[in-house]
Amino acid sequence: MHLRIVLVEPLYDGNVGFAARAMKNFGYSDLVLVNPCAVGKEGIARAAHARDVLENATYLTIDEVFETSHVTVATTGAVSKSASHPMRMPFCTPRELREFAEDIDGTVSILFGRENWGLNNEEVKRCDIICTIPTSEIYPITNLSHAVAIICYELSQLKPLVSIPLATYKEMEHLYIHIDEFLDDVDHPDFKKENTMILIRRVLGRMKLTWREVTTMHGLMRRAQRRMKNSQLEIKQE
Amino acid sequence: MHLRIVLVEPLYDGNVGFAARAMKNFGYSDLVLVNPCAVGKEGIARAAHARDVLENATYLTIDEVFETSHVTVATTGAVSKSASHPMRMPFCTPRELREFAEDIDGTVSILFGRENWGLNNEEVKRCDIICTIPTSEIYPITNLSHAVAIICYELSQLKPLVSIPLATYKEMEHLYIHIDEFLDDVDHPDFKKENTMILIRRVLGRMKLTWREVTTMHGLMRRAQRRMKNSQLEIKQE
């Protein structure tokens, strides 16, 4: 799926710059501008390190947008309240759009309207799909660049670049054996031990410990065990 | 779960205003500012109809933030590359944070750092959880207000206010019967019919049609059927 972000007649170049930045944050670069405001200093400043996205933006007419897309998506704050008004019904959420779009082999153009009144009915009419970001009834109008950021975030579904090396089953079992031994060393009453071990397993089990965290726990218990033994020796020697 | 957004030493009031707006868009209002820049005209303009969120923001010290929260979350662009550096490891994504937080009965404070260098190590150290928005390696630094918008979007999980009235099973079956009849009326060859009906079911089945869309299809077929009958009558009369 090739994602294209289309800003239809944006009024403020600051928003255009911010939208370019949000796109690049999520790995997208195909920005199309339809009859936009002049993009000046403010736009470039807000694009920050996404100046390339802004400068490589394509200027198309609305007809050209449709002619060069496989699927067109109209983003809209207002949706129809009834199925009797098919202009903005049915609609999907960004999450549903992701599921719909992920296996598309072609260009999916997502259209965002003007800051003051969005896409007009003519534009919405021609789109294949209506997408709306679920928002609070009290203040449903999101900033244009925020809407772009949320759609890009949702559609990109990037994975964190770093993975978290969890402790293996064996490492966890080894830890529980050590804790069991530690409970003996601190004279934890035998009759309580089984329940305490279950409790500890519940706590540590839901922690998704990394190997490093497990290693540190071993280390701390070993130190405590050593210290306890030393004091016992000292007591004996006295 | 009570969500609190904490901006730690934000440098630009425009971002503070935008953050307030994004919060209100997703139904949140508890904004905390720690030693922020002066919030002036620009901040108020960008907050737009979330001026109340901005004006009701609480000014706290970083200590007070921790003292009044049940769970604290440090948002960070950079995460540790290895589990050997537990400062920013392990971490979770906004989606994982949502799953973690949804059954919490208490205040979850999400800390966002300065625009230029984020949260410092002292602040990160004291937080319970590290959260990172997965971004492109090429340009991982998101705008502060975009990060707030994405976290609020993800955690709010609002449902669209309007539901989509899909056609019922019965209504769909009734439609297929009508289409079957229509195929006869247009002399669709009998030997092709079964496969054509399967194809039509595949197409319409994945469309999740609303009752209104089904009604319109019935109407169009009925009109065509009437017209065909009339022409036959006319032919006979001639």
Image (cartoon, coloured by chain):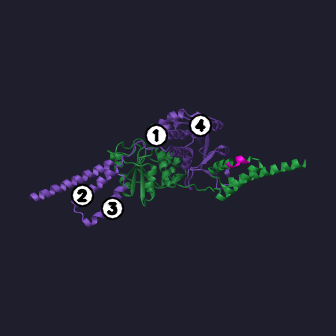
Chain colours: A purple, B green
Instruction: Please name the residue that numbered disc 4 is placed on.
Output: A33
Compare residues A46 and A108 and report the one nearer the observer.
A108
Magenta range is B190-194
Mark 3, secondary structure of its residue: helix
- Which residue occupies 72% across, 52% down? B180
Which of label 4 and label 2 is nearer to you?
A: 2
In this view, the residue in front, B155 or A196, is A196
- Name the main secondary structure of what is drawn in magenta: helix
Instruction: State how far apart marks 3 and 4 are (Cα).
Output: 59 Å
Please report whichever mark, 2 or 3, sits nearer to the chain's N-terminal start. Answer: 2
How far apart marks 2 and 3 lie (CA) works out to 15 Å
Please name the residue that numbered disc 1 is placed on.
B136
Query: The residue marked by circle 1 belongs to what chain?
Result: B
The front one of B49 and A96 is: A96
Residue ranking furthest to the right = B238
Label 1 CA crowd tier, 10 Å (few <14, some 14–19, many 20+) = some
Q: Quadrant of residue A83?
A: bottom right
Q: Are marks 2 and 3 in contact (CB under 8 Å)?
A: no
Q: CA distance from mark 1 to mark 2?
A: 45 Å
Q: Chain of mark 3?
A: A
Q: Secondary structure at mark 2?
A: helix
Between marks 1 and 3, how big is the CA–CA gap? 41 Å
Dot 1 and dot 3 within a common chain: no
Query: Chain under label 4?
Result: A
- Secondary structure type for disc 4: strand
Question: Amino acid type of disc 2?
Answer: Phe
Q: Work out whether disc 2 and disc 3 sit on a shared chain.
A: yes
Q: Which residue is mark 2?
A: A182
| Three-letter amino acid code at the position of disc 1 | Ser
Do the residues at pointers 3 and 4 share their chain? yes
